[in-house]
Image (tube, grey):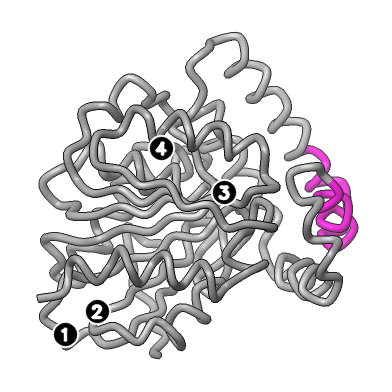
Amino acid sequence: MQEVFISIDGNNFRILTQNLESKNKPFVLLHGFAGSANIWKFLFENLNLDFPLIAIDLIGHGKTSSPKDYELYIESSLLDQLNKILTHFNIQETILLGYSMGGRLALSFAINNQNRIKGLILESSSPGIEDENLRNQRIQSDLSIAEQIDSKELKDFFTEWYKQPVFSSLRNIPNKLESLIERKTVNNKTGLTNSLKGFSTGKMKSYWNDISEMEIPVLLVCGSLDTKYYEIMQKMNSLIPNSTLKVNVGTGHITHLEKPDEFLNFVRSFLRTFLE
C-alpha cells in the first residue's frame, strides 16, 4: 500500500494505492463524512483479489486540502475532482465503492458517467431526498450541525455525534467507537463544515427517478439494525434492475467497521464476477 499526493486545481489530494499493475478494472473506494481513505485499510490488507485499489481522501477530509471556497464542495465540483483523479491514474473504466456520503458521490458519478462505471457498491447510502420540504429540512439540520462543529472541540462534537440512534449499535463495541472518535479529530473544521454545507443529503440532486435506468451491477449493503437505511436500500433494490441487497446482521450504519469479515465476503463475491 502506497500513499501518494496529487494536485487537482491547486488542491492536494491524498490517495492510497495498491496493485496498480493489475490488468483488472480498478476498484475505487470513497469514505463517508469526516472519514478518510484509512477506513478502507482493512480491505487493502484482506481483500486478496487481483484488483488495482485506490482509496481517496475527499476534499475537506483527512490529509487532503480543506479550502475555504465553498464551491469546491458542491456536487458538481466533487464529480469533477473524482473525474480528474481517475484521469490522473489513466482509469477509463472502474468499479466504485462508497460508504454513506461517499456512496452518494459514487452513485451520482455512476449515473452521470455511465460509460466509465462497470460496477457499483453502496454501503449505508441513498439517492438523496425526493420531497422538497424534507430536503429543505435536512439542509437546515445540516447547517445547524455545521455551526456545532465550528463552536465545539472536534472530540466533543463527535462524542455527541455518535450518540445518534443511527449509530446506536456502536455502543456494543466501545473500543472501536473510542478509536473511531479519535480518528475523526484529525479532520479540519473548515473542511467538515463546507462538506456539510456543500454536499449534505439535502444539497445533492435526488436520483430516485434515475436509478431505475441503471444497467450496471449494483451491490447494496446495510446493517440490519440501521432501520432507516435498511428501508431506503430495500426501496433502492426494488428499483435498480441489476441490484443485490446484502444485510449484515447485527450491525448498524457503519457495517464495515462492526463486522468487517462479513462485509468483505459481500464485496469479494461481487468483485469476483469482474475478474479477467
Choose the circle earlier in sequence order: 4 or 1. 1
User: Taking 2 as reference, is 107 above or below it?
Assistant: above
Task: Please state which of residues 239 and 6 is positioned toward the viewer in this rendering.
Answer: 239
Give how far apart the Cα atoms at labels 4 and 2 are.
Answer: 28 Å
Give how far apart the Cα atoms at labels 3 and 1 are.
Answer: 37 Å
Q: Position of residue 155 (x, y in %)?
A: 85, 63
> What amino acid type should be assigned to the residue bearing mark 3?
Lys
Task: Please state which of residues 190 and 172 is positioned toward the viewer in this rendering.
Answer: 172
- Tell me: 251 left or right of 84: right
Q: Position of residue 43 (x, y in %)?
A: 46, 78
Choose the circle earlier in sequence order: 3 or 2. 2
- Residue 127, disc: none
Marks 4 and 1 in Cβ contact (< 8 Å): no
- Residue 75, disc: 4
Which dot, 3 or 2, sits closer to the camera? Answer: 2
> What amino acid type should be assigned to the residue bearing mark 2?
Phe
